[in-house]
Amino acid sequence: MLNRRQRHILLKFFSLFSVVRGYNILIVIIAQYLTSIYILAYNRPLKKVLFDLNLFLIVLASAATIAGGYIINNFYDSEKDLINRPIKSKLDRLVSQNTKLIFYFALNFLAVLMAGYTSYKGLIFFSVYIFGIWFYSHKLKRLPFIGNLTSAILTITPFFAIFMYYKNFEAVIFVHAMFLFLVISMRELTKDLENIKGDLVQNYQTIPIAYGEKASKQMLSILAGLTIIPTCLLLYKYEVGHMFLFFYLSILLLIGFLIFLWRSKTKTDYLILHNVLKFIIVLGVFSILLIDVSIVFNRI
């Protein structure tokens, strides 16, 4: 049995884990390594990729920066989250704002330190990335279109870090990035529909508030239609191995998403739609393994 102090410490740990969304960071770490192994450095020996110190530090710097980003975002959105996510907000508040800020600066310092060890370009890249996350949380996220676009760009930025490291400029990589960017953009707009109540109270000028729910649904429909372009390219122009199964499933899920979208009216409906898009993103990460099932054994 845990005593009162131990329970309090455990609750604070879960609170901090909730604030930094550790599960999301774990997915990003896995995604960066799978992208490196199967896409960006597919022609390098597996051991050389897995035990590459510079790649390891870039991945850790990305994780630290993202964690810091979640903290500063939570700091600015604390009042809004009380309305949109009351249960999660209560858990997050077990850790004081001062403690969160200390962790924020510590994580960013470690990120810059690790990135700087790899190269001065890494130092500059992550310094700009950290500033971009802060500026988005402080100013840009309250603006329609700009906030959504910036959020989507910041979400895929960690992949640009390893992209620049390997200097692999093959066209298929940009097509993969386009697909991911469009799905993330859909997720951001769906989150705005889900959080419209809290955003309205806190005077956030998101797309649903500025232009209405119908216009937001029209934009989501356009974005879903645009995902067909990179999907078809990946299915019929480039070699993606058995990952074609994921793209066909994505098409079916997006069709279902659109049908349900136009029938959605409540926060619960939009939460379901948000989770559908999250499922596509997470499934896409693990589907990278399907590009070439034998690649691990052939490169040991």
Image (cartoon, rainbow, N blue to C red):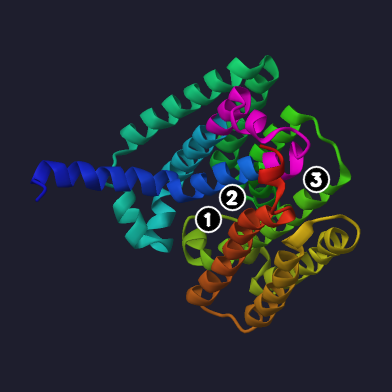
Q: Is residue 167 above or below residue 281?
A: above
Image quadrant where residue 30 sits: top right
- At horizontal 31% and vertical 48% (from top left) the residue drawn is 14
Q: Amino acid at mark 1?
A: Asn
Q: Is label 3 or label 1 in front?
A: 3
Gap in angstroms between the C-alphas marked 1 and 2: 8 Å
Image quadrant where residue 137 sits: top right
Residue 142: mark in rendering: 2
- At horizontal 40% and vertical 46% (from top left) the residue drawn is 19
- At horizontal 71% and vertical 33% (from top left) the residue drawn is 45
Under circle 3, the secondary element is helix
Q: Earlier in the sequence, mark 1 or mark 2?
A: 2
Q: Which residues are magenta?
A: 35-60
Left/right of residue 164 with respect to residue 128 in the rendered view = right
Image quadrant where residue 243 sits: bottom right
Q: Is residue 229 above or below residue 59?
A: below
Left/right of residue 105 with respect to residue 131 in the rendered view = left
Q: Amino acid at mark 2?
A: Arg
Residue on which the image places disc 1? 203
Q: Is label 1 or label 2 in front?
A: 2
Residue on which the image places disc 3? 173
Q: Are marks 1 and 2 in contact (CB under 8 Å)?
A: yes
Q: Is residue 145 above or below residue 125?
A: below
Left/right of residue 165 with respect to residue 268 in the rendered view = right
Residue 181: where, in percent of width, then height?
Answer: 72, 52
Closer to us: 21 or 263: 21
Q: Earlier in the sequence, mark 2 or mark 3?
A: 2
